[in-house]
Structures are given as C-alpha cells and as structure tokens.
Amino acid sequence: MSTAQVAVTTKADWTSDQEVRWCPGCGDYGILLAVQQLMPSLGVNPENTVFVSGIGCSSRFPYYMNTYGMHSIHGRAPAIATGVAVARPDLDVWVITGDGDGLSIGGNHLIHALRRNVNLTILLFNNRIYGLTKGQYSPTSEVGKVSKSTPMGSVDWPFNPLAVALGAEASFVARTHDLDRKHMMETFRAAHEHQGASFVEIYQNCNVFNDGQFNDVTKKQVRDEMMIDLVHGEPVTFGADGQRGVVMGSDGQLRLVELADVSSDEVLVHDAHRVDPSLAFALARLATDDQSPTPFGVFRSVERPEYASGVSAQVIAASEARGPGDLEALLRSNGTWMV
C-alpha cells in the first residue's frame, strides 16, 4: 500500500461520472454506496487504488469508482489482480466478483490467490444466481433450484463460499449482507486493514431473478433471531434478548442452545485469531439452510506471510547475488536456434 501523503477526500471524489446501470432495487447499489462512503476514511488515494472485476452484474463495479480499474475476463479477476499487486505492491488492490464469476470458471484463480495470501481485498457478491445472463443456477444455488438452466431443479450440491475460502487457507474470511450499510463498512474496513488476502462474502439480493433469497435471515424484522454476530473474544450469543447461543459438544460439533439450559462457561467464545481454521470452518457451516440462524462478521483473521513481499525479497536477493541482469544474454542462452 502506498506510503505517499494522503489527501482529504469525500465520497464524491471516489464516485465516477458513469451512470450506474443495475436493475432498480438490486442489492449491488447498497454495496457500492458502502464502499464509496468507506473509501475516504481508509487513508488511501484514488490514484493509488485499483478495482479489478471479472464478468457479471457485480463486475460493472470498476466503472462506478473514480479510481484505476479493469473490467477483465470471466473468472480471471484474482489472477489479473495478483499481477497488479505483485508488480505494484504500493497500490491498494480490490477484487470484485460474484458467485458465478468467482466460484465457477474463476474458482481455480480464487483459491490460489487465497492460498498464496496475495494482498487483495476480495468482495464476492453472492446472490445464488446468474443475473447478467438472465437467471441460470449458479455454484451457490441450493439443491432443487428451478432456473432457466435447471427447469426440473438443480441436482448440484452448492458451494459454501466461506468453507471454500477457509479450505484454501485464506488468512481473512468474513461475511456481511447488502441490507446493513454499517455492518458492510465495518467488515470492508477490517478486510482492507488486513495484510494478505481478505475474502468477504456478501449476501446480495437479485430482485429480478432470485428475489428474497435471504429474507428469512437478513430482513430487519428477523435479524435478531436469525443473525449471529461474531465478535472476537466475545461469547457467541444471539436473539432479541440475547437468550440463545452456540456451544461446542465433545464431538466437536457446534449446536444452537437456549442459554437458560447451559452454564455460561459452556458458551463458545469466538476466536477469529485462532491459527487452526477448524473453528472458523465449523461456524461457516453452522447454518443448515436458509431458515437457520446464520453467522456474520469476521470468521478468521490471522497473520501469514504476504505473497508480494516474498516475491520482492527473492528478486532483491537474486539481484544482489548475481549482479545486474543481462537481457540480451538471457535471450540468447540455452534453448535458442536459428530458423
């Protein structure tokens, strides 16, 4: 990230002059607003910030940010962003992707960016449908999903995006949703401050092709009972009166309980900094369906060597050991021939 002097900016400085072209009512509007309002407080300059996207509704995002950016090719945003981050570690690099773009054709690129711990802030908009191509099922669509490409219902088992990220050893993993701007901004800030690959899943409503997918969890009137806010170092409790909680059984399984039925020391205390990802993985799989209490917040935030720093160190070490390189000699070294 750049160490240059940071100018005082406002939301207007981060907002481009392009007309925002999403369907009226799309959850993408809320995410865009949260990012634009957050950026002035992050201590970065627009000219040192890059947004890279793939293909999909979410991937229009770079057009609407007054920064550098690239609307790249399907699924390849993490790969392109990796190149930017390694070549220019002074830049602030964000990746905008969706459940189709990031977990289907782009799944391989995503997991390797995460395992390498490239210094990227990755926002994955999950609406569980292909919106841009008009309503086909996606890698996160539930079993039985009736769509234009699955008229008899999907038989595919869906990806759990957080479980995928944790399986790839992502050093920062979080979840938020498009109906709570404050929560989004807090989550995005934490992701941005993390050194290394940050992965944030955003529950995002597609009001045209998959409207109300998350209503039973994220609508304001049900949030107290259905959303479990994860706070590092605090007991995992929820409910309008904080009357419910999460415990871990002797078998290692997490269970939802009424606090009146257990002692206070049995309630799970969240540890986002735990190096072993098994607890974060269990929390990521706590919700059994779209009508079950679901955790939100930072699941994992651990320190691990950042990729670009390691690459830069190798380049410096090689240069010091061998002296200045000779491109002409390299081009005419082993493996050349006359045609």
Image (tube, rainbow, N blue to C red):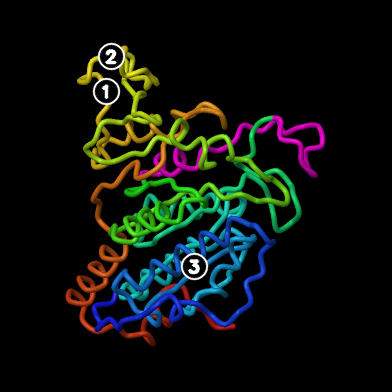
For residue 225, above or below residue 111:
above
Q: Percent position (x, y) of residue 319?
A: 22, 77
Answer left or right for 29 relative to 49.
right
Nearer to us of marks 1 and 3 is: 1
Secondary structure mostly seen in the magenta stretch: loop
Q: Which residue is mark 3?
A: 80
* Mark earlier in primary sequence (1, 3): 3
Q: Which mark is residue 262?
A: 2
- Identified by mark 3, the residue type is Ile
Q: Secondary structure at mark 3?
A: helix
For the point 31% across and 20% down, the residue is: 248
- Identified by mark 1, the residue type is Val
Image marks 1 and 2: residues in contact by CB distance under 8 Å? yes
- Identified by mark 2, the residue type is Val
Q: Secondary structure at mark 1?
A: loop
Q: Which residue is mark 1?
A: 267
- Which region is colored magenta? 144-169
Q: Secondary structure at mark 2?
A: loop
Check disc 3: other Cα within 10 Å, few if <14, some if 14-19, many if 20+: some
* Mark earlier in primary sequence (2, 3): 3
